[in-house]
């Protein structure tokens, strides 16, 4: 027993804890040097300066256990950072990662957590013992010798001086380098501050948008019955739609629908739901995203033009702009909040709600749907009998399960195809002048290339997250009455389109709603539509060229393969 006690005592000795804490907090710095695009001097700075700073902090109290717990936030960030590197393979903790924590519902979080178990176990094994050792040290009232502390302060000071020199050289040699963007954990604290700032701005939305108006007016004949449906999909990538040439028949129903126009070169401006969906629901885009804090959404524009509006969501509310814009409708419902709602029900659970709205026979109607679409776990997004591709029962996010995961994902696309065809059938049955627009907030990675990326929301997106479907259907009556609009849709079909910027204006054009905020150069339904360079709304809400963002040659190859000239 005595040797074991001696070993335990050595493991939790004050000096051991002092250096172990410094070491485990340095792990993200070393890992980021391997995963990020940094020059040699930036890498040296990223290790030397932060490690020396932590070293100095550890000398502020002679009880290393207390200092370890005082630095708990750094330990939390270090663990969080390593888990994200496991998930995405690169990038520091982004602003959007912090915002995802407060806008993701518990169900989604648990589904993702199940597939991060190896990473979670890893950080638990590394960091929890350190915290336990710190508690032991505190209870034992450990105190480091004064001469030891003075010596360590000198070492830390030398390290900080060396790091400062490296930082200066880095700034001088790299014009794009900024400590708040590239130096961990400075960048994490900077991003946390931005996340808090954006959360406050979001929470103030009701006040900042209270006096906003579109001054919208309808230009179509008041006597015509019109019904427009705007379907916002979830996690659907264009390369998995047979409408766009995918080898599997994932969209057999839409392929045979008369009046369907599919846009093959549509790209989203964000791969995170909490930004991409609000852009689809408003006039905000990557180029002017901050307007979202003071303007209302597309539903209000339709209301001002005399339309009755309905918002139906198959997702849980998350106190984000999605909720705010949805709740501007005359009627809104989050199906998953209903008592007795079966969470295993797919998006077809929205069909009875749609039928009720259509049965009321209003003269002017807008229905906005927010689906659960193809969000992971894929297998739970469609009924068992809808599985066209099998085996599809893998639920663990591992590269070895890719074939089964792709089968399940393709089944979700086929199920979306069935949903859209059903809605079109309901619209056709009304005899009204009607149209439907469908697009997805972003795409998805499913271990598609050597990088083995999975899911979406990476701070550095890939082709699979950006290329999304954009589909418009118009009824016979619509095509007869508004032939110039359908002609423009057809003419613009093969052009490059940013869905985040264009969907709002396209819907207004299709519905004949005029407002000073409508920009026909962004509308795919207008002859004035103008092709623009693809941009992406980065983590700091700046529009950056997609060409300068992609990290892999594979991404460029995939865009080229799909006929998309970046």
Image (cartoon, rainbow, N blue to C red):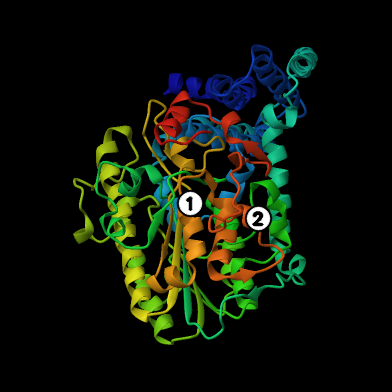
Q: Secondary structure at mark 2?
A: loop
**Foreground: 403 or 243?**
243
Residue 472 appears in which quarter of the rendering? bottom left
Q: Secondary structure at mark 1?
A: helix
User: Tags 2 and 1 in contact by the CB under 8 Å rule?
Assistant: no
Figure check: 553 above or below 410: above
Kindly tell me whether residue 205 is visible in this rendering: yes
Kindly tell me whether residue 343 is visible in this rendering: no
Q: Position of residue 289 (x, y in %)?
A: 68, 51
- Of mark 2 and mark 1, the one earlier in the sequence is 2
Q: Position of residue 283 (x, y in %)?
A: 64, 59
Seen at 40% across and 36% down, the residue is 562
Residue 205 appears in which quarter of the rendering? bottom right
Residue 446 appears in which quarter of the rendering? top left
Image quarter where the N terminus lies is top left
**Foreground: 404 or 71?**
404
Q: Residues within 10 Å of mark 1 (few under 14, many from 20)?
A: some
Seen at 19% across and 47% down, the residue is 390
| C-alpha span from label 2 to label 1 | 25 Å
Name the residue that disc number 2 marks.
Answer: 284
**Foreground: 221 or 172?**
221
Q: Position of residue 357 (x, y in %)?
A: 43, 81
Seen at 54% across and 30% down, the residue is 550
Q: Which mark is residue 491?
A: 1
Q: Is residue 295 left or right of residue 498?
A: right
Of tags 2 and 1, the one toward the viewer is 1
Number of callouts: 2
């Amino acid at each position: 027993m005595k040797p074991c006690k001696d070993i335990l005592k050595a493991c939790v000795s004050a000096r051991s804890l002092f250096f172990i804490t410094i070491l485990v907090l340095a792990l993200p710095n070393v890992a980021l040097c391997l995963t990020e695009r940094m020059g040699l001097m930036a890498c040296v700075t990223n290790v030397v300066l932060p490690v020396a700073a932590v070293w100095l902090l550890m000398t502020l109290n002679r009880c290393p256990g207390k200092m370890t717990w005082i630095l708990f936030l750094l330990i939390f960030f270090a663990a969080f950072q390593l888990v994200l590197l496991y998930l995405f393979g690169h990038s520091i903790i982004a602003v959007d990662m912090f915002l995802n924590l407060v806008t993701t519902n518990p169900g989604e979080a648990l589904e993702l957590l199940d597939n991060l178990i190896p990473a979670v176990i890893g950080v638990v094994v590394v960091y929890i013992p350190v915290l336990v050792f710190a508690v032991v040290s505190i209870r034992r009232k450990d105190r480091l010798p004064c001469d030891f502390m003075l010596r360590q302060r000198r070492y830390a000071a030398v390290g900080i001086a060396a790091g400062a020199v490296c930082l200066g050289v880095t700034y001088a040699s790299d014009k794009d380098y900024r400590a708040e963007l590239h130096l961990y954990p400075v960048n994490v604290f900077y991003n946390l501050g931005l996340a808090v700032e954006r959360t406050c701005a979001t929470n103030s939305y009701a006040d900042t948008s209270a006096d906003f108006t579109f001054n919208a007016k309808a230009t179509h004949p008041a006597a015509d019955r019109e019904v427009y449906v705007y379907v916002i999909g979830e996690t659907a990538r264009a390369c998995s739609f047979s409408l766009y040439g995918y080898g599997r028949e994932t969209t057999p129903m839409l392929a045979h629908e008369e009046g369907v126009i599919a846009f093959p070169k549509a790209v989203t401006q964000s791969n995170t739901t909490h930004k991409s969906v609000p852009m689809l629901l408003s006039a905000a885009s990557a180029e002017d995203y901050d307007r979202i804090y003071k303007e209302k959404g597309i539903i209000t524009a339709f209301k001002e033009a005399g339309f009755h509006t309905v918002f139906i969501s198959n997702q849980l509310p998350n106190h984000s702009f999605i909720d705010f814009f949805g709740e501007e409708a005359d009627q809104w419902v989050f199906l998953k909040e209903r008592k007795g709602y079966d969470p295993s029900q797919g998006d077809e659970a929205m069909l009875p709600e749609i039928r009720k709205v259509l049965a009321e026979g209003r003269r002017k109607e807008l229905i906005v749907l927010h689906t659960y679409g193809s969000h992971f776990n894929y297998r739970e997004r469609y009924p068992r009998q809808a599985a066209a591709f099998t085996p599809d029962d893998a639920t663990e996010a591992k590269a070895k399960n890719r074939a089964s995961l792709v089968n399940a994902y393709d089944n979700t696309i086929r199920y979306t195809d069935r949903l859209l065809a059903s809605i079109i059938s309901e619209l056709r049955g009304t005899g009204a002048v009607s149209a439907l627009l469908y697009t997805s907030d972003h795409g998805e990675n499913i271990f598609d290339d050597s990088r083995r990326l999975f899911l979406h929301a990476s701070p550095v997106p890939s082709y699979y997250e950006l290329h999304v479907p954009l589909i418009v259907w118009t009824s016979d009556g619509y095509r007869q009455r508004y032939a110039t609009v359908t002609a423009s849709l057809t003419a613009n079909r093969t052009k490059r389109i940013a869905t985040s910027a264009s969907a709002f204006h396209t819907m207004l054009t299709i519905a004949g709603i005029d407002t000073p905020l409508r920009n026909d150069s962004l509308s795919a339904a207008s002859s004035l539509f103008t092709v623009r360079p693809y941009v992406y709304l980065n983590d700091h809400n700046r529009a950056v060229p997609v060409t300068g963002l992609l990290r892999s040659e594979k991404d460029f190859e995939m865009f080229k393969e799909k006929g998309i000239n970046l």
